Image (cartoon, helix red, strand yellow):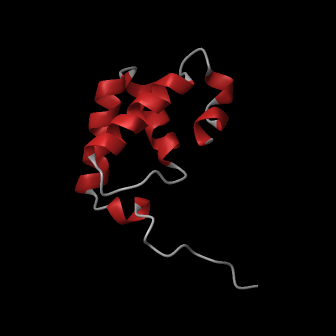
Amino acid sequence: MDINRSFKQMKDEITNQNLQNILFTYAVVNTNLDYCQGMNFIAGFLFLVTRDEGLSFQIMREVIQKNDMAELFDTSTPSLKRKF
């Protein structure tokens, strides 16, 4: 669902298939994590910079791993709730 809403104004530069390929590959390689909202923007930004799905995936994997960001994409982590 997020893929269809991402980068709508840039369809000449990035397609839904580009995003889906990067995110699917990440999901296959890292089975401990689930897709979480926002991953599409990381993948999309990297693709816009590199213009290469494979390289975008590799950079995304390294950034998440080296910066210890995995818990951001772990669905068992409790979400923040507004208390108003």
Q: Residue furthest bottom?
A: 83
* Quadrant of res 11: top right
* Residue at far top of view: 12
Q: Report the residue at 49% width, 33% height from top.
A: 44
Furthest residue to the right? Answer: 84
Asked which quadrant contains residue 6, the reply is: top right
- Percent from the top left, x then y, of residue 32? 30, 57
Residue displayed at 32% across by 35% down:
57
Figure disc tally: 0
34 or 12: nearer the viewer = 34
The vertical placement of 11 against 70, above or below, is above
**Residue 22, quarter of picture:** top left
Q: Nearer the viewer, residue 42 or 77?
A: 77
Q: Which quarter of the image is occupied by the N terminus?
A: top right
Residue 65, given in percent of the width and then of the height, sits at 25, 54
Which quadrant is home to the C terminus? bottom right
Which residue is pictured at 47% across the width and 47% down the height?
39
| Residue toward you, 26 or 68 | 26
Give the side of residue 30 with respect to residue 10, left or right. Answer: left
